[in-house]
Amino acid sequence: GAVVSQHPSRVICKSGTSVKIECRSLDFQATTMFWYRQFPKQSLMLMATSNEGSKATYEQGVEKDKFLINHASLTLSTLTVTSAHPEDSSFYICSASGSGYTQYFGPGTRLTVL
Amino acid sequence: TQLLEQSPQFLSIQEGENLTVYCNSSSVFSSLQWYRQEPGEGPVLLVTVVTGGEVKKLKRLTFQFGDARKDSSLHITAAQPGDTGLYLCAGAENFNKFYFGSGTKLNVKP
C-alpha cells in the first residue's frame, strides 16, 4: 500500500521559534496533500489543502501567515509553524492523495511548545 | 462546525458484543471513508465507499453508505479487544477534499 512519512515524529521547541514539519509520499505521486491538526481525544481538523506547484488553500480560521505550507514537488509538502506559542502545541498529521479517492495518512508529528 | 456528526461519541462494551457507529451529515459526499486511529498514530484506512446504498464487508466489520450519500454506518460483529480505538468517518467533497467526523471512541473490554 501507499506509504506517507512525516518528519520529525516529535519536536519540542521554545516559544517564538519556528518549526518545520515534512510530509513525504514514498511510493506514489501525491497530487494533493492535506494538513490536519488534532487535539487530545478529538477528531482531525482540516487546516489546509495543497496542490503541487500552487498556493495552499486554507480552511476558515487558519492563519496562513502562521502556518506556512509549501508543496514543492509531487512527493513533498512542508508545514512551517512560525513564531510558535504554547497554544500551537498539538498533533499535526498530513495525508496525501493521488489520482483516486483515497488519502493516505502519515504517522503524525507531536509538537510541544514550551 | 463539524460537517459530519458521529454517534455515539463513546462506547464501552464487553468482548463478543455487537455495535454500530453512525456518521451523519446534511451534505452529500462524493465518497466516504472510515478510519481507525490508535493514540499517537495517524489514522489507518478501513474502507472507502462511493456509491449510494453500497455495502462493504471487512471480516467482522460491515460498512454501509446511505442511498443519498449523506450518511454511513459501521457495524462490528462480535467485538474483540483489538477493535479498541478511535473510529473516524471522513467525507470527501469533489473527491479530493476530506472532512472528518467527530469520532467515536470504542473500548472493548475482555
Image: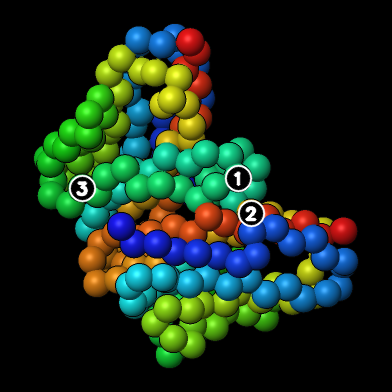
Q: Which type of secondary structure does the marked residue at label 2 adopt?
A: strand
Amino acid type at circle 1 is Gly
Q: In this view, does A93 lie to the left or right of A101?
A: right
Q: Name the residue under label 2.
A: A91
Point 12% across, 40% down: residue: B53
Q: Classify A45 as above or below A85.
A: above
Judging from the image, mark 3 belongs to the subunit labelled B
Q: Classify B35 as above or below A45.
A: above
Q: Do the residues labelled 1 and 2 touch (CB within 8 Å)?
A: yes
Q: Quadrant of residue B22?
A: top left
Quick check: do tags 2 and 3 share a chain? no
For the residues labelled 2 and 3, the Cα–Cα distance comes to 27 Å
Amino acid type at circle 2 is Phe
For the residues labelled 1 and 2, the Cα–Cα distance comes to 8 Å
Judging from the image, mark 2 belongs to the subunit labelled A
Query: Of B27 and A36, which appears nearest the observer?
Result: A36
Q: Which type of secondary structure does the marked residue at label 1 adopt?
A: loop
Q: Mark 1 points at which residue?
A: B40
Q: Name the residue under label 3.
A: B49
Q: Earlier in the sequence, mark 3 or mark 1?
A: 1
Point 30% across, 23% down: residue: B76
For the residues labelled 3 and 1, the Cα–Cα distance comes to 26 Å
